[in-house]
Amino acid sequence: MRVLIIDDDPILIMVCSRLMNITGFSQAVASSRDGKEGMEYLKTCLQERPAELPDIILLDINMPVMNGWDFLDLYRNIERELPNKICIVMLSSTVDQADYDRANSYEQVRGFYSKPLTKENLPEIKALVGI
């Protein structure tokens, strides 16, 4: 399973990557520091390396340059070009109910988890992907 983490916190990225590697959840973890970089990664994979497209995107909400909401709006535009659906999971430290409600308004978002990602979350996330 391939994972793309889009988050501006390098420590969170390191912890998530290590957790996924140690548990065997994924050995192929890529990361981007913001939504713009994440979108560029997806477009590059789509055009040049489709086999490297992620199965799951762990997406933060609050990031500089391009936040998670703006990423989701752009993602809608390229989604139909993708060979397979990507499971998007929000991973955020927010406690604002409006953020949960907004995430639920996107059909692309399959789950919402509070940071930090835990070993117990991984089977639930795997089930969201249908694997």
Image: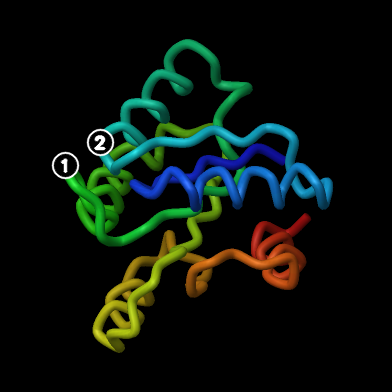
Q: Which residue is mark 1?
A: 65
Instruction: Give the percent coordinates (x, y) of residue 100.
Output: 35, 80
Q: Is 55 left or right of 69, judged from the image as shown?
A: right
C-alpha span from label 1 to label 2: 7 Å
The front one of 17 and 5 is 17
Residue 68 spot, x, y in % from top left: 29, 55
Q: Are marks 1 and 2 in contact (CB under 8 Å)?
A: yes
Question: For residue 98, which quarter of the picture?
Answer: bottom left
Pick whichever of labels 1 and 2 is earlier in the sequence: 2
Identify the residue at horizontal 40%, vertical 18% (top origin).
Answer: 44
Q: Position of residue 7 (x, y in %)?
A: 39, 48
Which residue appears at 43% of the width and 43% of the height? 10
Report which quarter residue 96 is drawn in. bottom left
Q: Amino acid at mark 2?
A: Lys
State the residue at coordinates (48%, 74%).
Answer: 114
User: Residue beneath label 2, please?
Assistant: 36
Q: What amino acid is labelled 1 in the image?
A: Val
Q: Secondary structure at mark 1?
A: loop
Image mark for residue 38: none
The vertical placement of 103 against 28, above or below, is below
